[in-house]
Amino acid sequence: MQPNFLIIGAPRTGTTHLYQGLRQHPQVFMPDFKEPMFFAYQGQARPWAIDTWADYQALFRDTDHFIARGEASTLYLWHPNAAFNIHRRVPEMRLIAVLRNPVERAFSQYTFQRLLNMEPYDTFEAALAMEAERQRSSASAFLLYSEVGRYGEQIARYQTLFSSEQMQIVLNEDLQDHPDRVFSEMFRHIGVDPSFKPKLEHRTNPSGIPKKKALYERLKAGGRKVKGLIPKQLAMQLSGALDRRYLTRPNLGKETYNTLLALFREDILYTQELIGRDLSRWLEPMDDMPNT
């Protein structure tokens, strides 16, 4: 078996929230392995990715009784070869992409990488200054904060290969403000009952910096040990409570925000044209935005 739909990204836009909601639907199958990354890294051995077609198909073994079968790999949107690889294997694939204000997304990605101990620089500005060097050295895409947020050129690659009916573009703000409507539209897009309402009171994968790093890591490690022994919903509730108590969200400075916004401006306008959505809110400088 093989999937007939994919969540293709982008990172830190709400894809895990979608994954958790979609897989609750009784007509939908999504494997526990959330990000196999096969279509990005097929034939390239990576410890965190599936690189053979046989192993990838095994994720969907004995799932033919599900109407919709899919997975969520957040680098498919960014990776330059993923669209072609998907089309070559499954040209009729249904696709879902989630977009978020690229400046906010970049900063969220940075704080999440700090949380995972994958980002050595203790300021966002220092990490951004290293991005060109990281690109030259083929660093992880999860450390390329501005590069991954250039949605226009990424979406254009997919639009040359897939019809508009095959692609659904979701805005993060719609997912936050109108989750029931967004999930209903997604269920309809992948061909399952659109009236199903998933239970998603608790957001997943928050970003932030631990207030007490050693304590936070011990508590998280303990949580992983008992995760499989308690109901999944309870595990999500406990993890969310831990994150709310022990994580602090750093602020993005106005100067850095507006510098990045200028960098993204042309791509935001291009993205707006490609997807037919008004993205003017993303173009507002921080001076014009309320403090949060």
Image (cartoon, rainbow, N blue to C red):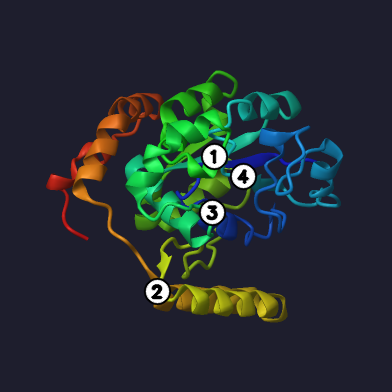
Is residue 280 in sight in this rendering?
Answer: no
Q: Amino acid at mark 2?
A: Lys
Q: Amino acid at mark 1?
A: Ala
Kindly indicate the quadrant of the structure image that contains residue 178. bottom left
Residue 211 disc label: 2
Q: CA distance from mark 1 to mark 4?
A: 13 Å
| Residue count near mark 3 (Cα–Cα under 10 Å), binned few <14, some 14–19, many ≥20 | some
Which quadrant is home to the C terminus? bottom left
Q: CA distance from mark 1 to mark 2?
A: 27 Å
Q: Is residue 207 above or below residue 266?
A: below
Q: Residues within 10 Å of mark 4 (few under 14, many from 20)?
A: many
Task: Say which residue appears at 42% left-offset and 31% top-offset.
Answer: 150
Is any part of residue 2 visible from this angle? yes
Mark positioned earlier in the residue sequence (2 or 3): 3
Q: Which residue is mark 4?
A: 73
Above or below, comparing residue 283 to residue 187 in the picture: above
* Residue beneath disc 1: 141
Q: Nearer the viewer, mark 1 or mark 4?
A: 1
What label does residue 118 carry, if any?
3
- Residue 227 found in image quarter: bottom right
